Image: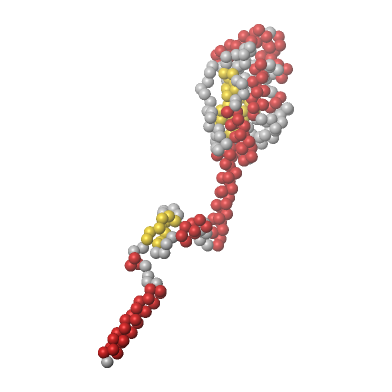
Amino acid sequence: MATNENLPPNVIKQLAKELKNLDETPPEGIKVGVNDDDFTTIFADIDGPAGTPYENGVFRMKLILSSDFPHTPPKGYFLTKIFHPNIANNGEICVNTLKKDWNPTLGLRHVLLVIRCLLIEPFPESALNEQAGKMLLENYEEYARLARLYTGIHAKPKSKLKNGAISESTTALNVDKRNTSSAQNADQKNTLASTGAPPKMSSSKATRLEDQPAGTVPQSNESGVVGSSTTLPAAAVPITQKKDVVLKAQAEKKKIDARKKSLKRL
């Protein structure tokens, strides 16, 4: 089964934007649903247009996008059984927009509107359902009766399609970032493995360590991330050279004072 991985990142990004737009401002009589993890199959519920034999019906259909989309047109299928000249018994849709008139610049909105227009104005000249096409040309009343019958039996309201989940912040729009990040991590690992050098500390971590007062040691958690520091006991801090000099000077002064007192006695 095709998934988002079969589509180029730029195509996924464009589809995400189109689907978000369709979700926020749906075309009249059309409601789109999609799986965020698989943009290659797009579902839609189409309301039967008023004044047609399909009125009051809800027809579920799907568009299947190939890995070459948008260079090749999607394939359209009605999942709801319908009596229509341009829709085969297996649900396949015959419309020029999805065949010889396809253009990579056509958006999903245009495709869905064209399919809904088929319910208003069928084209019996290019019929996939020959019985419906012939009946439409020769006996419209009988054609309309059968179309209404199919609609009443099969085109009942469906369970709601998933909607409101499409967002430009979805993983689909972050494909480039994920790929770039993964590539950078892989390059760093390869570099470390070849040189044997330890990981280079980030400047922010180095700054935090430099700012810590003397006599502290950084602690690390299980992931090896440097965290808070722990202050060593005073006894563990070595006496500096400066302190040694002061103590020696004080001792010498005491010796001199003692000698002066001895001389005065003499």
Measuring from the top left, give residue 173's x and y in whole percent.
58, 39
User: What residue is rendered at 71% in x and 11% in y?
Assistant: 137
Would you place residue 109 above or below residue 197 in this image?
Answer: above
The extreme left residue here reads 265
Answer with left or right where residue 188 lies relative to residue 265: right
Would you place residue 87 above or below residue 202 in this image?
Answer: above
Measuring from the top left, give residue 68's x and y in whole percent.
66, 36
Whether residue 43 is visible, yes or no, is no
Whether residue 76 is visible, yes or no, is yes
Image quarter in which the N terminus is found: top right
User: What residue is rendered at 64% in x and 29% in y?
Assistant: 108
User: What residue is rendered at 53% in x and 18% in y?
Assistant: 157
Answer with left or right where residue 234 lies relative to residue 33: left
User: What residue is rendered at 63% in x and 36% in y?
Assistant: 14
Residue 253 versus residue 89: which sits nearer the camera?
253
Residue 35 versus residue 109: which sits nearer the camera?
109
The extreme bottom residue here reads 266
Measuring from the top left, give residue 140's x and y in whole percent.
68, 9
Image quarter in which the C terminus is found: bottom left
Measuring from the top left, give residue 152's x and y in whole percent.
56, 13
How many marks do you count on the picture?
A: 0
Answer with left or right where residue 213 lies relative to residue 262: right
